[in-house]
Amino acid sequence: MLHQYLSEESFENLKQTIEDDIQQAKNDQARLRRELDELNMEMRRRELQDLARRVEMIADITCAVILVAQLILVIGH
């Protein structure tokens, strides 16, 4: 219907422009997905590092508590 108002050349140019825009949008979408994946990996890496620090802190506290308990047992007997 649109092509009845446009010359054949104008219609083909418009069609090509639309196809190019669609391809560019697909490329942009793929690039944005890759960037989002990279951000998510960075967030996961930071979360895992934070978790590792917490586990290490808990392990240090647990060792200290065990050491104090052993010391109390040795001194108490």
Image (tube, rainbow, N blue to C red):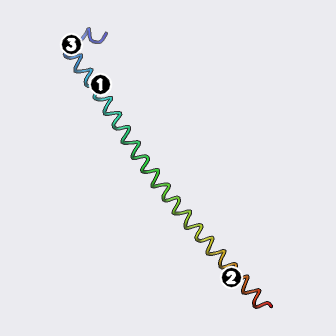
- Residue density around tag 1, few if under 14, some if 14–19, many if 20 or more, within 10 Å: few
- In the image: residue 47, left or right of residue 12: right
Q: Nearer the viewer, mark 2 or mark 1?
A: 2
Residue 53 picture location, percent across and down: 55, 67
Give the residue type that dot 3 points to.
Glu
Residue 54 versus residue 70 in the image, above or below: above
Question: Residue at 26% across / 25% down in the picture?
Answer: 17
Residue 52 picture location, percent across and down: 55, 65
> What is the spatial separation of the Cα atoms under label 3 and label 2, in whole angstroms?
88 Å
Whether label 3 touches label 1, CB < 8 Å: no
Q: Quadrant of residue 7?
A: top left
Kindly identify which residue carries mark 2: 67
Label 3 vs 2, first from the N-terminus: 3
Give the residue type that dot 2 points to.
Leu
- In the image: residue 52, left or right of residue 22: right
Q: Nearer the viewer, mark 3 or mark 2?
A: 2
- Residue density around tag 3, few if under 14, some if 14–19, many if 20 or more, within 10 Å: few
Residue 10 picture location, percent across and down: 21, 17
Question: Residue at 23% across / 12% down in the picture?
Answer: 6
> What is the spatial separation of the Cα atoms under label 3 and label 1, in whole angstroms?
15 Å
Residue 77 versus residue 24 in the image, above or below: below
Kindly identify which residue carries mark 3: 8
Kindly identify which residue carries mark 1: 18
Give the label on residue 60, or none: none
Tell me the element at label 2: helix
Question: Residue at 31% across / 9% down in the picture?
Answer: 1
Tell me the element at label 1: helix
Residue 23 picture location, percent across and down: 31, 31
